[in-house]
Amino acid sequence: MKNNHITDTIKYVGTDDREIDLFESQYIVPNGVSYNSYVILDEKTAVMDGVDERAEEAWFRNLEQVLDGKLPDYLVVSHMEPDHAGNIQKFMEKYPQAQIVVNAKSLSMLSQFFTLDMSARSVVVKEGDELALGSHVLTFIMAPMVHWPEVMVSYEKTEKILFSADAFGKFGALDTEEDWTCEARRYYFNIVGKYGMQVQALLKKAAALDIQKICPLHGPVLTENLDFYLGKYQLWSSYEPEDQGILIAYATIHGNTGKAANKLAELLRAKGVEKVVVSDLAREDMAEVIEDAFRYDRMVLAAATYDAGVFPCMESFLARLKSKNYQKRTVGIIENGSWAPMAGKVMRESLSQMKEITIQEPVVSIKSTMNAASEEQLELLAQALVR
Ligand code: FEO
């Protein structure tokens, strides 16, 4: 971040990481990611979270520049995930006068990650506790499972800033010019999506606060139109669809199931469905497909049979949907099998383990390649999916 100004007394000291191959070893981040960290300068100086070990050097450099010879009094730890907590021990060794501000759960995790005994230098806080820094006062609010169990956010009441931990974060380094919603949505559903109820609990607490700025741990500081961002989180965490549209996710071996998926898309478009997204699960970023599954109100799964089950990338997609709490949607099924089609049965069974899923009949069954009978079934499915 070229300009580290959040307010006159709050500075950004985080870093961009454009070298990382996979965030959390599973998410591609074409525009990198930022690890956000902030300093509140007052009679007491507080550092709000750290950064990944990968960015250690840049963080300490940024810190020294902003501290300008002052010594930090506190390191406030919102949660213990290493993308923010990786340098805690190095910080506490470098600044031996500093205290670490944690809740009891984080305190118990410190010794799991670090060898330095920090218990005597810990300020242990709980829901509603305040920490006065001078004119700034931090209030701690517990936000368990958004997205680790020990997460807490901090509200600074003088400048009305919410330090929101991972909530309201997005993929993408801060020097990326891109829309917030797309990469924030991909981040949300893949990283926090399972915990909609806990996000709702946090939003309820946030609703009682006068918030002028949101400082998350990834992505830009949000300073304007906060109702937009709060509204998106309200919607996403309720698992309600964001847009009318149909995702067709397919798993094809030799291309025939893919042809059926594209044929269905063609039929739907011809019937006036404006938003139809077709995704090849073997080749596209599955995190993006998960995002689309939650974004739209309807989905069709098309898969080949494989080893008396379903082709592996579909199996993996279904497992992810279940683990992210996919629910409240209408889903169509297209199966393919050359001798003993099983994919439809397996997909239906997986979907039956998710909440409030309506299977849209008819299930289309293809033997190897589309023929007149299966094209007729596709037509019936398309008709049934149109609203
Ligand atoms: Fe960005 Fe839960 O760490």
Image (cartoon, grey):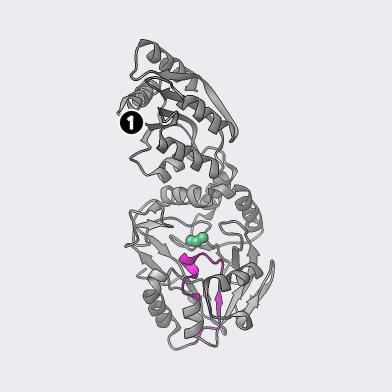
Residue at point 57%, 27% (across, down) = 358
Residue 96: horizontal and vertical position, in percent? 52, 87
In this picture, is 52 found above or below 254? below
Quick check: can you spot residue 134? no
The kind of residue tagged 1 is Ile
Residue under the image location 51 percent in, 52 percent down:
229
Q: Residues within 10 Å of mark 1 (few under 14, many from 20)?
A: some
Residue occupying image coordinates x 56% and y 38%:
240
Q: Please, which residue is most extreme toward the top here? A: 372
Q: Examine the structure image and report whether residue 130 is included in the region drawn in magenta.
A: no
Point out residue 112 in the picture as x, y percentages from the top left corner: 56, 70
Residue linked to disc 1: 253
Q: Is 318 placed above or below 227 here? A: above
Question: Quadrant of residue 17 in the image?
Answer: bottom left
Residue shown at the point (59%, 67%) measured from the top left: 154
- Residue 116 is situated, as x and y percent measured from the top left of the image, at 54, 80
Question: Total of numbered circles in the picture?
Answer: 1
Q: Is residue 82 magenta?
A: yes
- Is residue 90 left or right of 106 when viewed as pictured? left
Q: Secondary structure at mark 1?
A: loop
Q: Residues in magenta? A: 71-88
- The front one of 80 and 141 is 80
Task: Say left or right for 175 vs 233.
Answer: left
**Place of residue 11 in the rendered image (x, y in percent of width and height, measured from the top left):** 46, 74
Q: Quadrant of the N terminus?
A: bottom left
